[in-house]
Amino acid sequence: MLTFTVIIFVVAYLIFTYTGLGSRLKAIGAGETAARFAGIRVERTKILIFGAVGCITGLAAFVNAIKVGSVTSTAGNQLETQIMIALVLGGMPVNGGSKVRFYNIILGVMTYKVLSSGLVMLMMPTQLQQLILGIIFLIEVALFSDRKTGMIVK
């Protein structure tokens, strides 16, 4: 599982940093209309990215099914919340754009993992862990977000 994660991170980093697709994605995130006027095929790029994300999600679900041994309808509950908390903890701009940096993702995921593992080691109930993580998320957004740009400023 770690091998898949590292491979996907390296490939995503290389694409996001060193290809025209990464530049187009940043432009679309900064302003879809402006990107369209700049000559970027926004719809085509979005279809390509949504397809890639679907493939990666399918691979992650397959690996998770192998790891757990079964699949239930609640297997992915609260994953989107965990992702949002990790991205905000890493300083990722909430609305995307040209200020997005790849290291924000890595930093946020590592910070979130340390925080959630610490709460588990303290033997806190799951509901209390979720409450604490939610409060940290709200404090982070309230204190560090720039209302004009939507960026997390640290």
Image: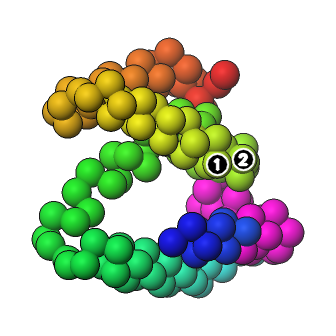
Residue 105 percent coordinates (x, y): 62, 49
Q: What residue type is labelled 2?
A: Tyr
**Does residue 77 appear left or right of residue 23 in this picture?**
left
Confirm whether residue 92 shows in the render. no
Residue 66 percent coordinates (x, y): 34, 81
Question: Which residue is denoted by mark 2 in the rendering?
Answer: 103
Circle 1 SS class: helix
The region drawn magenta spans 11-32
Tell me if residue 1 comes above or below residue 120 in the rendering: below
Q: How many marks?
A: 2
Spatial CA span between label 1 and label 2: 5 Å
Residue 2 percent coordinates (x, y): 57, 67
The 10 Å Cα crowd at callout 2, few under 14, some 14 to 19, many 20 or more, is few
Residue 146 is drawn in which quadrant?
top right
Q: Viewer-proximal residue, 151 or 6? A: 6
Residue 143 percent coordinates (x, y): 50, 15
| Cβ atoms under marks 1 and 2 closer than 8 Å | yes
Q: Which amino acid does label 1 sit on?
A: Ile
**Does residue 103 appear left or right of residue 139 in this picture?**
right
> Which residue is drawn at the image coordinates 25% and 78% (left, top)?
69
Question: Which residue is denoted by mark 1 in the rendering?
Answer: 106
Q: Viewer-proximal residue, 53 or 148? A: 53
The 10 Å Cα crowd at callout 1, few under 14, some 14 to 19, many 20 or more, is some
Residue 139 is drawn in which quadrant?
top left
Tell me if residue 118 comes above or below residue 100 in the rendering: above
